[in-house]
Image: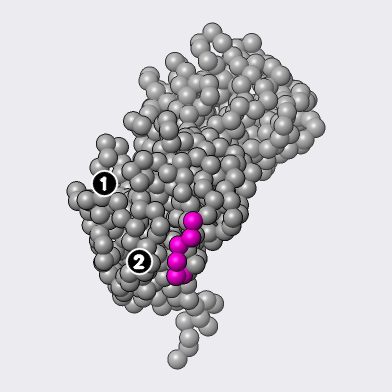
Amino acid sequence: MANYSDIKGFTVQTLSSDPAASQASTGSWASGGSLNTGRYGVGASGISNSSSLAFAGNNGGGVVNNTESYNGSSWTELNNINTSRFYLGGQGTQGAALGFGGETPGKTAVSETWDGTNWTEGNDLNTARLSLGSGSLAYTEALCVGGWKSPGVASEVESYDGTSWTEIAEMNTARNGPFVSGDNTNAIVSGGSVEPGVQTKAELWNGSSWTETGDINTARYNGGAAGTYTSALIYGGSNQGGTVDAETEAWDGSSWTELADLSAARNYADGAGISNTNAIYAGGYTTTTVATTEEWTTTPAATFSKSTEGQLYYNSTTNTFKETITDIPSTSWSSGGTMNTGRFYAAGSGASNESARIFAGGTSTASTSVLNESYNGTAFTEDADLNTARDKTAGTGTLTLALVIAGTDSNLANVEAWNGSSWTETTDVNTARRQGMGVGLAAPASLYAGGYTTTFVASVESWNGSSWTEVSDLNTARISGGAAGTQTEGLVFGGEPTTANTESWDGSSWTEVNNLNTARYFLAGSGTQTQALAFGGYVSTDVANTEVWNGSSWTELNDLSTAARAASGKNSATSALAAGGGPPATSQSEEWTASLANKTITTS
């Protein structure tokens, strides 16, 4: 009998479970052995759920100095820490640890080291504090972050070198009870509380400065943390109003993903572990002090199967053939960062919603602007202004190499190029106009199609990096349509006069293809000639419609949260940004991020 691989040229794997986006995403919590002394506000250290240390805390009746070690099944009482306290920080391993700060009651700066047998008092923190954040790796590279000091919430950060504490650069956002993963050279700090608000903000530490990065999904503080600055895990804690939380989130170096919840919501517990694939949470507080332990484990690395686009396999547990695909149809829009200046009729460039640029646009119906902001997936940053104020313009290119083309009611021919740090005037288009469509994922290779002079035009011009050349016209003259694709494989759709018409460009001519489902103009486009998004726009009012193009037809998908005449980066169909809108001018943004999904293959 012939093998399938000989007939088809590839082998279909047999897997007992679906492949996952990451090893951390396969994790779950299970019950472990209980502490001998139930308590909250515990100090913690350890490398895994089978090798950790819990020390000090509050047993509900007062502060204690108990120290216990965990071997993966039970806790053993060891020599006590010298200073009884709770809400303290801890870092290190089961045999070499550091406990610092806390409440005795009263804020303390006391720091003690553990050698596997005894605790020894060392040099104190510079700032006494409690409810602080601490790392999860070697105690000789400890980090003390934020907390409650006298008076108020701390932004101070201190680094330990194995002997003494040194004050280093402060966080951007002061907070108490933050989650910390990493050490004094590389760490991520997330969550925390600045009364009365609970934070979602996260910041990365590179050994010299703090940089804001992707927010956590659920605002909270005083929970457990494990891992490093590229593979962190946070769990439990308190959310707004002090309600205890059970949620778990993993950080992969770029974004946070919600994972399996703790079995029991709680805060102020012992959290430790050096990776986001193995961790522990012991003790804590629900509505009373608890002694319970939960252990986080994931699929072993040796058997973990990671999702990859186009992966075919047979799931032997569910008896199904499956394929791993980018699941655009199930994707929805989520809130993004807020622009520094709200506007409408702007333009954009960029490869994704984590690498985008929004420029020009009107801040009111009587104004144009030179504004230029970049977006990193979390926050907008103001960059160097355009030379010529404009709106109703077109943009092409990437975050670092972009074009802004023509625009404004006075019909500019002016074109400017962005080189990563500034805008430079370059060769004008041949026909001055406004509201044309920019096609091009790379700035040195772009098209400018359609627009308005004293009437709607079908003219198309091609840019080679130094000059514009007139090429074949559109079949339908139009303005303010959506666009996607490249200089040789482009797509334009929608526009005014109100149309659903779609045209495809092959490098020499335009061909009419299947229409949008909803005719509109002032819409945004993103993607390629074979996989594109159309979103937002205007008919007799702003619309929120989103449609996906599969190379032959358009399908309605999940709408924008807010109907808008959108501005957008020239992103992909799997990672798009809709920013601003109006009039009146808005500063909101929404992100479209399609992820991989395992889909059953069916026949009919």
Label 1 close to label 2 by CB (< 8 Å): no
- Please state the horizontal and vertical placement of residue 448, each as a whole percent of the image: 65, 30
Taking the view exactly as shown, the residue that stands out farthest to the left is 287
Residue visible at 45% across and 66% down in the picture: 118
Residue 227 among those drawn in magenta: no
Judge from the rendering whether residue 409 lies leftward or rightward of residue 289; answer left or right.
right
Taking the view exactly as shown, the residue that stands out farthest to the right is 466
Which residue is label 2 attached to?
68
Q: For mark 1, give the secondary structure.
A: loop
User: In this picture, which residue range is highlighted in magenta?
Assistant: 116-121
Residue visible at 42% across and 54% down in the picture: 225
Q: In which quarter of the image is residue 441?
A: top right
Q: Is residue 21 visible?
A: no
Q: For mark 2, give the secondary structure.
A: strand
Judge from the rendering whether residue 486 lies leftward or rightward of residue 330; answer left or right.
right
Q: In which quarter of the image is residue 151?
A: top left
- Please state the horizontal and vertical placement of residue 190, each as a whole percent of the image: 45, 44
> Mark 1 against mark 2, which lies toward the viewer?
2
Q: How many tags in the picture?
A: 2
Q: Residue 244 carries which label?
A: 1
Judge from the rendering whether residue 208 lies leftward or rightward of residue 581; answer left or right.
right
Residue visible at 73% across and 28% down in the picture: 422
Q: In which quarter of the image is the C terminus?
A: bottom left
Taking the view exactly as shown, the residue that stands out farthest to the top is 366
How far apart marks 1 and 2 lie (CA) works out to 25 Å
Please rate how many residues cluster around mark 2, counting C-alpha atoms within 10 Å: few if below 14, some from 14 to 19, many from 20: many
Which of these two is toward me, 479 or 326?
326
Q: What residue type is labelled 2?
A: Glu
